[in-house]
Image (cartoon, coloured by chain):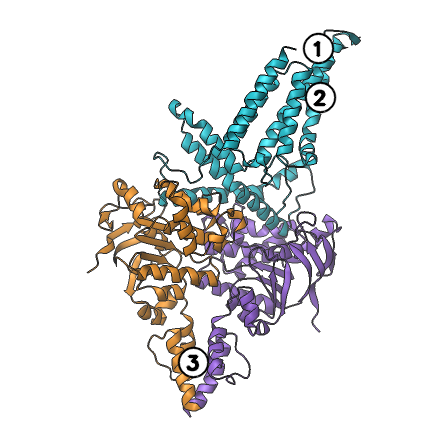
Chain colours: A orange, B purple, C cyan
């Protein structure tokens, strides 16, 4: 049995300038080696939750544990070491003067020796296919490329947990596919626990579990198949369905008797293929 | 024959006196009342193209005619100001240009610059705001207190309040949640129906398939494709060469045609078209 | 995106001057400035000019580019020189009016003054033109290290410096983007009185400040998440490596100093 990488118990959180609780009595567990997608409307508290896990806001005492360690000011340095965090805005997390220097920033903070750095940087940049850009300055990169560098910067530190706060939103579709495939591989090798905050149904489909956040509460936690297939829920939280389910529902609306269970792209394709074959 | 809103004739642009070219020998026309999608990666020259179209830059060589105004390397500044009266330009992340104390004052900024009376500017601002679903209680709020999605809509209202006839939109849905994106796409369709000519810069091919009448693809400062979205998505080699990802409906349809080459009489590029075509065939299959 | 190159800014290249250690270049520049004031006669000044010419040639940057960079400053130098010429005394008097006079000693002094200014400006330009801002920051950081013992927060200053340098292009892009956006909204930056023009900066400055504060906040959080702690030691990815050519450069400077002091005796 795998232990919980993250344990959250009865977490309440309120910003000083607001009257309402941003997070309301939230309880959640993420087993090590799992990928949890967090979905919900903008303003539902997703980013706040992610920041509290990494101790980037003042985490209320005895509410969050990462790898068995309570998130508090005393443990904060160790917590940061366990977690890699990638933010939404690619420009505002690019510290280095070049791609390689930016990946190096985290390594320098960890006091990795300068002779070891080039190898680690090269590996991390290869994971996100940015090795050809290592000497480029940030202003010579697109938003998506900067975002990949940020992901490389986080992975270079070999975190146990990777938090992506809408980190793939700036990527072009091709780049997004590349990066997500790499992350799924790391997860499958059992090396990485992932929390990704996202609006992208394809990213949700890659996760093991989905937590649906609405007004500071987790209103549903289930497999992607279950969540994505729940149309009324999806609509309420402003998520779009994956392509296969949209097509399935459109066909249904046109009077075609399609299976009502969750269908991936492959499964739907197979089904249509079969139907067409019976005609031929 | 469509009337053209913009025509580019051999337009070239260089920032360093001809050593490198951001745009080279670009010729195309933008039909009036239609949506033209512009696709290209960072450095393809699409930002330069938009800045030229709004008269924010002048061509180094060649000329362009925008809404009847001819622009060349020697066009005077005053002529450009006049040109901008009929063009609206929504930059990427337009919420970054908000500055006024109140939402209403910010939206009135554009019309006031055009020299209309403050009474008229107010009317125009209110109309634009309600078009974007920003209601009365927000008018006197500071734009900086609003959510990101609301700020975006206020900024777009600030451009629409100038009542442009040509609208340039640079990645208008970037960073919005799916609801916000959908609202904006609906608005774009509505603006087209109202007769606006729209230049839409986007990297989302679904939007191209859904909205565009014409597509221009740029790469390293040159025009590499011009035609309808259907023609573009029917050309897998071109797509691959320029690292463009076809819409999911197209991929799905292509997969099916591998087994059934004659499946579609009219190749579908959007979800609705795909569902229509498939439903017809599958109904046939059931009977 | 106005890509006008200001002179004094780094020009990419691979010349010997480009490849020298930034510490040597910064210290060497300081040293030359000091030496300039020890040059007292025709021979010593001639020597300094030859040394300077050597540096300029080694940088493989066109002489014309140096001249374009120095020319605007020449006016200031000439103005100072003229004042100096008329208010100094000694030697043969060519012309006099009240306390204002033009003398032979004055003219010689003015000649040296112009020469000194010229050497100082050109020497520092050679350094800035051949050193990336980043290498400059690294060099300054390394040279400031001894100040640690005086409790000067050298690491933090270096971090501030390198982040500031990192964001200069970003902020320049942002300014031109905001200006374009406001011009697209019908604003005219080019006409009207000084006051109205100043007022027009408001729609540019406010969004710029808002963006900068937001950036500062987000950047701080991102740096914290990546384990940055200003009070902890850090290793360094970019190592400055002192090479043979740097030792060579230093020896050349020492030799130059020696010759200069010999020539002073003449």
The answer to whether residue B203 is left or right of residue C109 is left
User: SS class of the residue under badge 3?
Assistant: helix
Image marks 2 and 1: residues in contact by CB distance under 8 Å: no
Q: Chain of mark 3?
A: A
Quarter of the image with the N terminus of chain B in it: bottom right
Q: Chain of mark 2?
A: C
List the residue tagged with mark 1. C88
List the residue tagged with mark 2. C79
The answer to whether residue A177 is left or right of residue B119 is left
Q: Which mark is residue A251?
A: 3
Do badges 2 and 3 share one subunit? Answer: no
Q: Mark 3 packing: few (<14 Cα in 10 Å), some, or many (20+)?
A: many
Residue drawn 25% across the image and 40% down it: A74
Say whether disc 2 or disc 1 marks the residue closer to the N-terminus: 2
Is residue A87 among what the camera can see? no
Question: Which quadrant would residue B220 be assigned to in this image?
Answer: bottom right
x%, y% of residue B207? Answer: 52, 67
Q: Mark 1 packing: few (<14 Cα in 10 Å), some, or many (20+)?
A: some
Which residue is outermost to the bottom? B287
Do badges 1 and 3 share one subunit? Answer: no
Between residue B176 and residue C168, name the one nearer to us: C168
User: SS class of the residue under badge 2?
Assistant: helix
Is residue C222 among what the camera can see? yes
Quarter of the image with the C terminus of chain B in it: bottom left
Q: Considering only vertical position in the picture, is B167 above or below C94?
A: below
């Amino acid at each position: 049995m795998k232990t919980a990488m993250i344990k959250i118990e009865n977490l309440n959180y309120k910003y000083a300038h607001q009257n309402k609780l941003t997070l309301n009595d939230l309880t959640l567990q993420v087993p090590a080696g799992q990928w949890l997608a967090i979905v919900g409307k903008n303003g539902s508290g997703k980013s706040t939750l992610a920041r509290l896990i990494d101790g980037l806001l003042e985490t209320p005492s005895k509410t969050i544990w990462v790898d068995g360690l309570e998130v508090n000011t005393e443990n904060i340095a160790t917590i940061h070491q366990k977690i890699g965090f990638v933010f939404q805005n690619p420009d505002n997390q690019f510290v280095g003067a070049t791609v390689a220097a930016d990946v190096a920033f985290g390594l320098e903070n960890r006091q990795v020796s300068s002779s070891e750095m080039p190898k680690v940087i090269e590996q991390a940049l290869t994971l996100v296919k940015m090795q050809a850009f290592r000497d480029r300055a940030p202003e010579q990169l697109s938003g998506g490329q900067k975002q990949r560098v940020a992901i490389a910067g986080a992975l270079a530190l070999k975190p146990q947990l990777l938090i992506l706060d809408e980190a793939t939103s700036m990527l072009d579709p091709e780049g997004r596919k590349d990066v997500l495939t790499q992350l799924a591989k790391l997860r499958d090798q059992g090396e990485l626990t992932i929390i990704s905050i996202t609006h992208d149904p394809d990213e949700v489909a890659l996760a093991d579990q989905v937590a649906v956040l609405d007004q500071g509460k987790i209103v549903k936690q289930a497999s992607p198949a279950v969540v994505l297939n729940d149309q009324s829920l999806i609509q309420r939280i402003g998520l779009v369905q994956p392509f296969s389910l949209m097509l399935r529902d459109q066909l249904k609306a046109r009077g075609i008797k399609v299976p009502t269970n969750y269908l991936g792209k492959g499964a739907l394709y197979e089904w249509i293929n079969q139907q067409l074959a019976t005609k031929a | 024959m469509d009337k053209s809103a913009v025509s580019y004739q051999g337009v070239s642009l260089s920032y360093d006196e001809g050593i490198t070219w951001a745009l080279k020998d670009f010729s195309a026309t933008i039909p009036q009342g239609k949506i033209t999608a512009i696709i290209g990666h960072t450095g393809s020259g699409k930002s330069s193209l938009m800045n030229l179209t709004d008269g924010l830059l002048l061509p180094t060589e060649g000329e362009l005619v925008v809404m009847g105004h001819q622009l060349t390397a020697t066009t005077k500044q005053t002529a450009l100001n006049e040109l901008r009266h009929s063009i609206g330009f929504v930059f990427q992340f337009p919420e970054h240009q908000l500055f006024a104390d109140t939402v209403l004052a910010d939206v009135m900024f554009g019309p006031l610059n055009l020299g209309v009376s403050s009474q008229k500017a107010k009317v125009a601002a209110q109309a634009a705001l309600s078009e974007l679903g920003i209601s009365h209680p927000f008018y006197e709020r500071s734009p900086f207190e609003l959510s990101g999605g609301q700020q975006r809509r206020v900024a777009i209202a600030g451009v629409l309040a100038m009542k442009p006839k040509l609208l340039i939109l640079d990645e208008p849905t970037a960073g919005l949640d799916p609801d916000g994106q959908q609202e904006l796409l609906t608005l774009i369709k509505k603006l087209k129906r109202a007769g606006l000519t729209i230049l839409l810069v986007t990297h989302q091919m679904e939007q191209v398939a859904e909205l565009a009448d014409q597509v221009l693809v740029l790469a390293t400062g040159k025009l590499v494709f011009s035609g309808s979205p259907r023609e573009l998505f029917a050309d897998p080699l071109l797509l691959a060469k320029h690292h463009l990802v076809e819409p999911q409906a197209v991929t799905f349809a292509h997969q099916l045609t591998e087994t059934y080459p004659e499946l579609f009489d009219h190749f579908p590029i959007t979800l609705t078209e795909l569902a229509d075509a498939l439903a017809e065939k599958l109904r046939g299959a059931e009977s | 995106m106005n890509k006008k190159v200001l002179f004094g800014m780094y020009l990419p290249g691979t010349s010997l001057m480009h490849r020298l250690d930034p510490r040597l270049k910064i210290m060497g520049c300081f040293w030359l400035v000091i030496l300039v004031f020890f040059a007292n006669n025709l021979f010593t000044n001639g020597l300094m000019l030859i040394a300077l010419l050597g540096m300029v040639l080694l940088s493989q940057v066109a002489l014309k580019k140096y001249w374009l960079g120095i020319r605007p400053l020449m006016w200031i130098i000439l103005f100072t020189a003229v004042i100096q010429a008329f208010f100094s005394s000694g030697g043969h008097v060519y012309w006099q009016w009240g306390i204002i006079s033009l003398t032979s000693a004055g003219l010689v002094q003015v000649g040296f003054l112009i020469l000194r200014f010229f050497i100082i400006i050109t020497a520092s330009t050679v350094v800035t033109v051949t050193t990336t801002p980043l290498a400059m920051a690294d060099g300054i950081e390394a040279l400031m290290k001894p100040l640690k013992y005086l409790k000067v927060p050298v690491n933090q200053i270096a971090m501030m410096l390198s982040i500031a340098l990192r964001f200069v292009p970003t902020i320049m892009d942002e300014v031109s983007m905001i200006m374009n956006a406001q011009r697209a909204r019908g604003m005219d930056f080019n006409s009207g009185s000084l006051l109205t023009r100043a007022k027009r900066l408001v729609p540019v400055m406010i969004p710029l400040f808002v963006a900068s504060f937001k950036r500062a906040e987000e950047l701080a959080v991102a740096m914290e998440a990546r384990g940055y702690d200003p009070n902890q030691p850090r290793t360094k990815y970019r190592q400055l490596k002192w090479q043979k050519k740097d030792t060579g450069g230093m020896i050349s400077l020492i030799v130059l100093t020696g010759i200069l002091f010999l020539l002073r005796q003449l």
